[in-house]
Image (cartoon, rainbow, N blue to C red):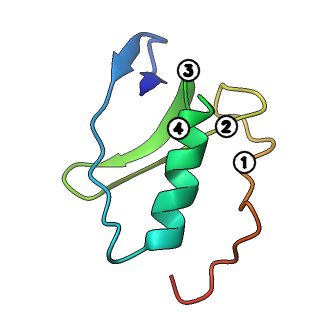
Amino acid sequence: MASGSGERTTAFIEIELYQEDAPLHVENFLLLVDDLRYDFTTFHRVIDDFMVQGGDFENRDGTGGYTGKWFGYCNGDE
């Protein structure tokens, strides 16, 4: 997956997913990845060995806009 940094340099990141703990979230995330929605977006929050937040699909620069579509799912218990 390609991502942008503060310097607008393209890099690749590796993300570990926990299918057994959050199957709907993982499926949704992978659909967005396969659709190249995260390519060249900003990850604005990174906590090493824990999580990342990002994905400005509309503006691709971290300023907001459309985030993601839940393909008919709701957050529910996940």
Looking at marks 3 and 4 on the same chain, the residue that comes earlier in the sequence is marked by 4
Mark 3, secondary structure of its residue:
loop
In x, y percent, where is residue 18? 30, 66
Task: Please give the residue where the numbered disc 3 appears in the rendered image.
Answer: 40
Discs 2, 1 touching: Cβ within 8 Å: yes
Between disc 1 and disc 4, the foreground one is 4
* Residue type of the residue flagged with mark 3: Phe
> Could you say which disc has been placed on residue 67 in the image?
1
Apparent side of residue 17 relative to residue 7 in the rendered image (left or right): left
Going by the picture, which residue comes out furthest to the bottom? 77
* Residue type of the residue flagged with mark 4: Val
Q: CA distance from mark 3 to mark 2?
A: 9 Å
- Give the vertical position of 75 relative to 27 (above or below): below
In x, y percent, where is residue 75? 63, 78
> Could you say which disc has been placed on residue 33 in the image?
4
Q: Looking at this view, is 9 or 70 the one in front?
A: 70
Discs 2, 4 touching: Cβ within 8 Å: no
Discs 3, 4 touching: Cβ within 8 Å: no
